[in-house]
Image (cartoon, helix red, strand yellow):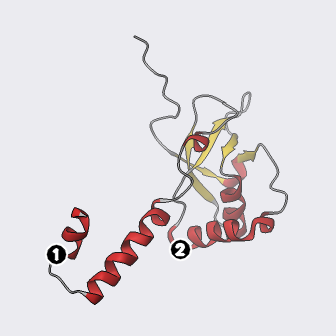
Amino acid sequence: MNTPKIGFEKQRMVLPLDRILPVRVVKDPDKNVSRYQTIVSSIREIGVVEPLMVYPQKGNESFYLLMDGHLRLHALRELGIPEVECLVATDDESFTYNARINRLSAIQILKPTWKCLLLSSMLHPQPNICDSAYRL
């Protein structure tokens, strides 16, 4: 039986933004205002949640090609953040792992649940509201 190939290095790497080379141009991030502004706000408030995915540039390993995270990179530059934590890919696949995962962040998924729990605890105070909601 073949062992699957690991898609990323086991350790994340912190890279200066000037060492990350985008593989496509972000024409106008403000065109998709809500998504881009959400990314900027999120980075400003809590930092980068989803690391950029990079691949070492062939012939010059001090630079990395950006495989995924072009809007995040643009936002980091706009915010004046000099470096970022990255996942280093072991293969230069043209498609990204993001095409296979949920586009919603954990916060977006859990926010309605937390709102419900908060409202429920305000309307019907119980000692173990989280336990009873979890059993639902």
**Rendering coords of residue 54 (x, y %):** 63, 41
Residue 43 coordinates in the image, percent (x, y): 58, 67
Asked if marks 1 and 2 touch (Cβ < 8 Å), the reply is no
Q: Which residue corresponds to the image point at 46% horizontal and 62% vertical from the top-left?
A: 109
Q: Nearer the viewer, residue 126 or 75?
A: 126
Question: What residue do we see at 25% from left, 64% from top?
Answer: 136
- Horizontally, residue 11 falls left or right of residue 99, namely left
Q: Nearer the viewer, mark 1 or mark 2?
A: 1
For residue 131, side relative to residue 66 (left or right): left
- Residue most extreme to the right: 27
Quarter of image, res 62 = top right
Instruction: Give SS at disc 1.
Output: loop
- Image quadrant in which the N terminus is located: top left
Residue denoted by label 2:
45
- In the displayed orientation, state which residue is furthest to the bottom: 123
Task: Locate residue 59: give its quadrant.
Answer: top right
* 40 is higher (above) or lower (below) than 92: below
